């Protein structure tokens, strides 16, 4: 079973790459599903077929799906939404403002991840290719299962017990709505849809992320940040695709300066992503939509390579022995010292890179040790644990 996440800055051609990869995979005999988690779905436009929330056969061995995240949200969040609406109504907030506040940003997209899990566990497909939302939304989505896990394990049971105790007392003195068991069951169902997502997406032997970029300064900078944050959350990146590279057949002097600029950017990509597979995709002289044109894209992109193979090795987290000490190594390519902060609280290690934070639950072998130092070197954060004296 393989899951391939295709992401990149908006407008770089990630949907085209995802759609072409899926056709190439199916042509090689793999039972393939390509699904879009981007709210601005464009898979249907790429294939030039009608697609919806249910999977649709595109070519032999290939199904495609544009997830209706709002429908999934209604199924699992309905009771909680109704409760929050009652609370806002009680507080005096009504109308469209109250309705908007009952659904947190990104929550509707979150159910896309649960759908990945459902398909992976169904056994109906050998390969699932995910056309992700633009990078910022992708990072938020990929971090949510872990954030929810922390909340459900530490806060949810306490909140449920407290609500059961205070509900009778509050109902006697106030008309404020108090969450009942139906609301808590709704939250539990919401979490259950995410259960197991992290195990699938965080396993580098199952899931690989592939970054799509154009040879442009700002786009490459965005890809570098994405690479760092994916490493922070434990997702393996095995390849990058540089799209819209000027082909050698373009010899018009008008493009000479543009070719020089692209050459400089391609060198930066080669240096910055030297540890992963790098593939170039030329700037085509026509719009590459439809099955036949996308098949050309897939053939040029992969050649004799099977897209389901691990294009490069690498595990973002590992533990090493260092004499009597143990080192937890976290891959953080391109991170700067000023962006990284490490803090330990009891059995958890909190790692912050820029605006993103991750809680790493320490294994038993590290819980009994104390943090001696943390050092960022050669794209890796090395946290050394020693024995307590």
Image (cartoon, rainbow, N blue to C red):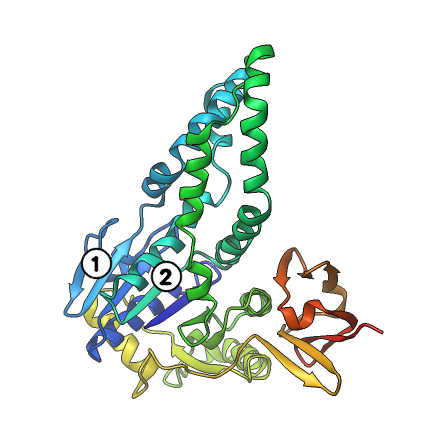
> Is 278 on the left-hand or right-hand side of 381?
left
Q: The residue tagged with tag 2: helix, strand or loop?
A: strand
Graded by Cα atoms within 10 Å as few (under 14), some (14 to 19) or many (20 or more), the crowding at tag 2 reads many
Image x and y of residue 316, in percent: 56, 75
Above or below 385: residue 290: above
Q: Which badge, 2 or 1, comes first in the chain's sequence?
A: 1
What residue sits right under mark 1 in the picture?
Answer: 48
Q: Nearer the viewer, residue 14 or 108?
A: 108
Image x and y of residue 78, in percent: 38, 33
Could you tell me which residue is drawn at 29 percent across and 58 percent down? 43
Above or below 348: residue 243: below
CA distance separating discs 2 and 1 = 16 Å
Q: Nearer the viewer, residue 195 or 338?
A: 195
Q: Nearer the viewer, residue 56 or 279?
A: 56
> Is 17 on the left-hand or right-hand side of 52?
right
The disc label shown at residue 131, or none: 2
Q: The residue tagged with tag 1: helix, strand or loop?
A: loop
Image x and y of residue 255, in percent: 46, 76
Graded by Cα atoms within 10 Å as few (under 14), some (14 to 19) or many (20 or more), the crowding at tag 1 reads few
> Is 7 on the left-hand or right-hand side of 231?
left
Image x and y of residue 121, in percent: 30, 62
Which corner quadrant holds the N terminus?
Answer: bottom left
The disc label shown at residue 175, or none: none
Could you tell me which residue is drawn at 46 percent across and 20 percent down? 95
Could you tell me which residue is drawn at 60 percent across and 69 percent down? 228
Callout count: 2
Residue 91 shows up from this direction: no
Residue 267 shows up from this direction: yes
């Amino acid at each position: 079973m393989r899951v391939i996440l295709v992401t990149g800055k908006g407008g770089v051609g990630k949907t085209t790459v995802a759609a072409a990869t899926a056709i190439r995979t199916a042509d090689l005999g793999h039972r393939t599903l390509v699904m879009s988690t981007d709210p601005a779905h464009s898979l249907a436009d790429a294939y030039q077929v009608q697609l919806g929330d249910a999977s649709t056969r595109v070519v032999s061995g290939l199904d495609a799906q544009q997830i209706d995240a709002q429908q999934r949200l209604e199924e699992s969040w309905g009771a909680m939404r109704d409760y929050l609406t009652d609370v806002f109504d009680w507080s005096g907030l009504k109308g469209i403002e109250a309705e908007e506040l009952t659904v947190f940003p990104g929550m509707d997209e979150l159910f896309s991840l649960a759908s990945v899990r459902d398909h992976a566990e169904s056994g109906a497909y050998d390969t699932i290719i995910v056309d992700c939302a633009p990078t910022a939304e992708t990072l938020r989505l990929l971090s949510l299962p872990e954030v929810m896990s922390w909340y459900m394990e530490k806060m949810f049971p306490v909140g449920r017990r407290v609500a059961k105790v205070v509900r009778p007392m509050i109902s006697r003195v106030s008309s404020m709505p108090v969450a009942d068991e139906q609301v808590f069951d709704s939250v539990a169902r919401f979490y259950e849809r995410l259960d197991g997502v992290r195990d699938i997406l965080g396993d580098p032997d199952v899931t690989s992320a592939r970054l799509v970029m154009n040879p442009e300064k700002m786009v490459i900078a965005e890809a570098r940040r994405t690479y760092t944050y994916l490493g922070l959350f434990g997702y393996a990146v095995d390849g990058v695709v540089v799209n819209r590279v000027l082909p050698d057949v373009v010899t018009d002097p008008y493009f000479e300066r543009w070719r020089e600029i692209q050459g400089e950017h391609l060198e930066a990509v080669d240096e910055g992503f030297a540890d992963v597979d790098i593939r170039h995709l030329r700037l085509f002289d026509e719009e590459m939509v439809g099955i036949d044109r996308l098949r050309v894209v897939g053939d040029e992109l992969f050649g004799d390579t099977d897209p389901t193979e691990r294009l490069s090795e690498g595990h973002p987290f590992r533990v090493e022995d260092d004499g009597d000490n143990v080192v937890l190594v976290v891959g953080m390519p391109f991170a700067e010292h000023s962006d990284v902060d490490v803090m330990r609280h009891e059995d958890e290690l909190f790692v912050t890179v820029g605006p993103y934070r991750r809680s790493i639950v320490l294994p038993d072998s590290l819980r009994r040790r104390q943090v001696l130092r943390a050092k960022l070197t050669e794209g890796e954060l090395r946290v050394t644990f020693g024995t307590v004296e």
